[in-house]
Amino acid sequence: MKITFLGTGTSQGIPVIGCDCHVCNSNDKKDRRLRVSVCLEIQGKNILIDISPDFRFQMLRSGIERIDAILLTHEHRDHVGGLDDIRPINFKYRMDMPIYAVQRVQAAIRKAFDYIFDNDYPGVPKVQQIAIEKDKKFMVGNTPVMPVEIMHAKLPVMGFRIGKFAYLTDVKTINNDQMQYLEGLDVLVLNALQHTEHYSHLTLEQAIALAKEIGAKTTFFTHLSHTMGSTADTEKLLPENMFLAYDELVIESEDPEFGELESISI
């Protein structure tokens, strides 16, 4: 079982258009970040969490050819903007794409991509919307997934726990009743936007504190802004067993519960 980080940047990505800061001008591959998304390969199936505007390039770059299901955290465009690019998968595998999301996000998708739902033209993406709910485990094929509600300022966002792995992005706060779903993790992926206070995202300091509270064996930070600083400099600030994720990072586990890591590679 394998986790591939397709994108680890914030909504503008890195480099940011027109920016001449040292991070945007960096030659370090780890400082070049597409919009945030991750692919989980489980029992021969590929589950995508969020489908960013960079989805097409992410798939070509990673060599991943098929997605079997998409889990959406929320409706912001940096997390759903690549939906049109599922068409080659529709065509090649003759499948409608299952998309798991809460009803509010489903409605937003129908509005933003109305041509998908109100058009019988055969060239539009084909999707199957499947509703999920807070506090209710659901199945993606044979894989159980527990949604974890987190708060992006005042907007509820869904994180996802699969076995001993959890993916939480665009977090600012987590209500106490949801922390129970994050107990006993081996691997946590958590957003950390920048060093200075932000109204809807965790700072690095806040993300480290929350990661310590959750207590996963290993934590990776994602959804990073160019104002965070370079990967090389920022990694020096991290506690033991906490790391910055970066594009094309691959982590693998032989544990059927998606537990302790066996390898990390790029």
Image: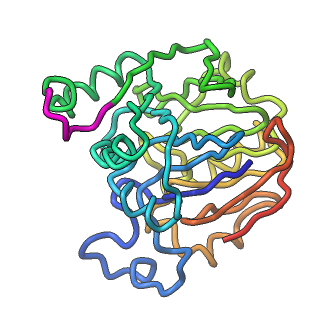
How far from the left and from the top, in percent, is residue 22? 43, 83
Quadrant in the picture for the C terminus: bottom right
Q: Is residue 207 above or below residue 70?
A: below
- From the viewer's side, name the closer residue of 33 and 211: 33
In percent of width and height, residue 156 lies at 45, 24
User: Which contiguous range is marked in magenta?
Assistant: 120-126
| Displayed quadrant of residue 108 | top left
The residue drawn where x is 28% and y is 29% is 109
Answer with the quarter of the image where residue 161 lies: top right
Q: Nearer the viewer, residue 39 or 124?
A: 124
Instruction: From the top left corner, tell me how far across and down residue 166 is, in percent.
Output: 68, 37
- Left or right of 96: which side holds 109? left
Q: How is the image coloured?
A: rainbow
Taking the spot 81% from the left edge, 58% from the top edge, the residue there is 241
Q: x, y (%) of residue 89?
A: 39, 46
* 28 vs 148: above or below: below
Q: 18 or 37: which is nearer to us? A: 37
Toward the bottom, the furthest residue is 27
In depth, the one of 197 and 222 nearer the eye is: 222
Q: Which residue appears at 81% of the width and 62% of the height?
A: 263
Asked whether, in this view, residue 204 is left or right of residue 97, the answer is: right
Total count of labels: 0
Secondary structure character of the magenta stretch overall: loop
Asked if residue 55 is among those painted magenta in the image, a careful observer would answer: no
